[in-house]
Amino acid sequence: MSQPQEFEKVLGQSATTVAQFEEQKSGLRKLQHFLHSNPAAVPMIVLLALIVIFGIARGERFFSAYTLTLIMQQVAVVGILAAGQTLVVLTAGIDLSIGVLMVFAFVIMGNFVLAYEMPAMVAILAGFLIAGGGGALNGYLVSRLKLPPFIVTLGTWNIIMAICLIYSENATLREADLTAITPLLHIFGISFKVGPAVVTLGVVAMLILYVGLWYMLNYTAFGRHIYAVGDDPDAADLAGIRTNNVLLKTYTLAGLIAGLAAWVSIGRNGSISPSTVVTDFNLQAITAAVIGGISLFGGRGSILGVLFGTLIVGVMSMGLNMLGADPQWKVLLTGILIIGAVAIDQWIRKVSG
Amino acid sequence: MANPILTARGLTKRYGKVTALDNCDFDLYPGEILAVIGDNGAGKSTLIKALCGAVVPDDGEIRLDGQPVHFTNPMQARAAGIETVYQNLALSPALSIADNMFMGREIRKPGIMGSMFRMLDRKAMEKVARDKLSELGLMTIQNIGQAVETLSGGQRQGVAVARAAAFGSKVVIMDEPTAALGVKESRRVLELILDVKKRGLPIILISHNMPHVFEVADRIHIHRLGKRLCVIDPKDYTMSDAVAFMTGAKVPEHVIA
């Protein structure tokens, strides 16, 4: 047995009781600790507050199941994109190309059916392949060539946007032409009634995706590895995680999720217009993720918070619309929410420091 | 003496014009604690990184149990039974103790939930983690699910040591395990090291703390200018001798291997 050094001999008499501290926790400290272990709580509280506020302001009309499910329909596409974005942001990355990947994927799906007269299943598969392939390219550049994710996806965003416009010659594919051939492309637009609520299959797809990703992130090794890589990549590497593979898979998965968003988007919009490639879907997805409490520094946040973040934007948009407010108020409030969310994230992080 | 469990012969590693390892030899015998000491820049870290797979040497041979091995990353060394406690601990701060201990070697649920749905067996992992921590007499960790960033420095060290001890089957390497710790925590870690030794695992201990080295080491490998200068028995030499050797103030008369 080791011989303690002279000055260490007193250690034998040292206290053995578990440290007890007078908990001088103020309410604020308690809140900070609560939020540290429940990152989805902030967006949930904000969402409930918004619903209550608009409910009071607009009463029955806003509070109806119809309105609330209409919001779900409106946010389904961005919600799905935000879920993909979340995976990338959790690895301390960012995917600016996720929106154009979606648009290019639905342009491919439409053209395969109309121009190349392929079966709908082949067209959908092709759309997923394009979106997943674009994601894999991002992942390859980030993980193997070690380029910063912001730069990589800024590049692929522009490249894919240009390819999409050149390839499609900016020609819109009409809904009637598509549905005359196959109903499959518009399957996510099918709605059904649950009491007064109208639910589309697109909304169902979004909810299933969120539950699936929540399961993956919390109950599978791959999910834990995504958090570990975003938290501290060097530590993850030394602990035996193939960080490169995790990054490659994450970006590819985000691309495939953009493919799903493309399919849902066709059902929601009916026609397919390549010109929507200039819409800021990527920024909307980042906004939802950030408001949902995902830390842009990686490794922190809950995917369920992103669902709330998506709904916050949708509720605000609908509520202000019903109040007859200038739509710019929504933009202004979104900006405030983004900064507020990041400020709260920084505050919560200080819990251990 | 029995055959060495881990040996290196003629290891060389250059970074540009800097020679970090110069034809360096190394031997670790079963069941011993071998301390590696040396001045800053002597090449200790490079030697250890070569042994644990974090650095690929330009030249030379490493043998584990007599068999030549060629690690190109830490995972291969781990798979071969060499576990390392890194100076920066290699823990993910936001993840729980159990998540960290099983990082990269998670246990899945038995049956279809594990094979089809890849569901982690949280309960099993938490149980093993708790057992390992208390087996090593580890401190007052209240909740195995708490994030590592909420632990004190000594507790984090304990988690990292427990992880290495739990999974190392051949060799455990510890890089400066007491550097950041208080008196009491250092004592616990030294006892942990001796506990690990008692279970038959040989340990390579890198440290600048001479009293700790002389207390627990069976042999001391003194590293100087990129190679093994000598190996001494701590019972035959004083701490000032060791410091003199490693700084070049004195040259050892004879070398024991």
Image (tube, coloured by chain):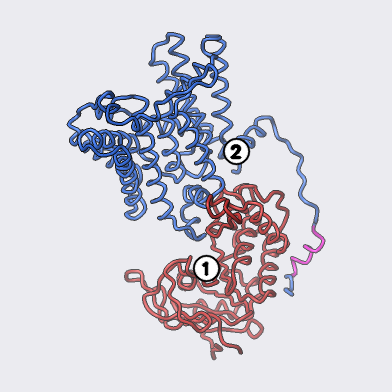
Chain colours: A blue, B red
Q: Which residues are magenta?
A: A6-14
* Rendered residue at 80%/53% (across/down): A17
Judging from the image, what secondary structure is the residue with disc 1 in?
helix
* Residue A9 sits inside the magenta stretch: yes
Viewer-proximal residue, B161 or B42?
A: B161
Q: Which residue is mark 2?
A: A36
Dot 1: chain letter: B
Displayed quadrant of residue A39: top right
Q: Secondary structure at mark 2?
A: helix
> What is the chain letter for disc 2?
A
Tell me which amino acid carries mark 2: His
- The span from disc 1 to disc 2 (Cα, nearest Å) is 33 Å
Q: Is the residue marked by circle 1 packed among few (<14), some (14-19), or many (20+) residues within 10 Å?
A: many
Secondary structure mostly seen in the magenta stretch: helix
Q: Looking at the figure, which quarter contains the N terminus of chain A?
A: bottom right
**Is residue A71 toward the left or the right of residue B208 in the image?**
left
What residue sits right under mark 1 in the picture?
Answer: B78
Percent coordinates x, y for residue B37 in the rendering: 54, 74
Tag in front: 1 or 2: 1
Name the amino acid type tagged 1: Arg
Q: Looking at the picture, does residue B2 appear above or below residue A43? A: below
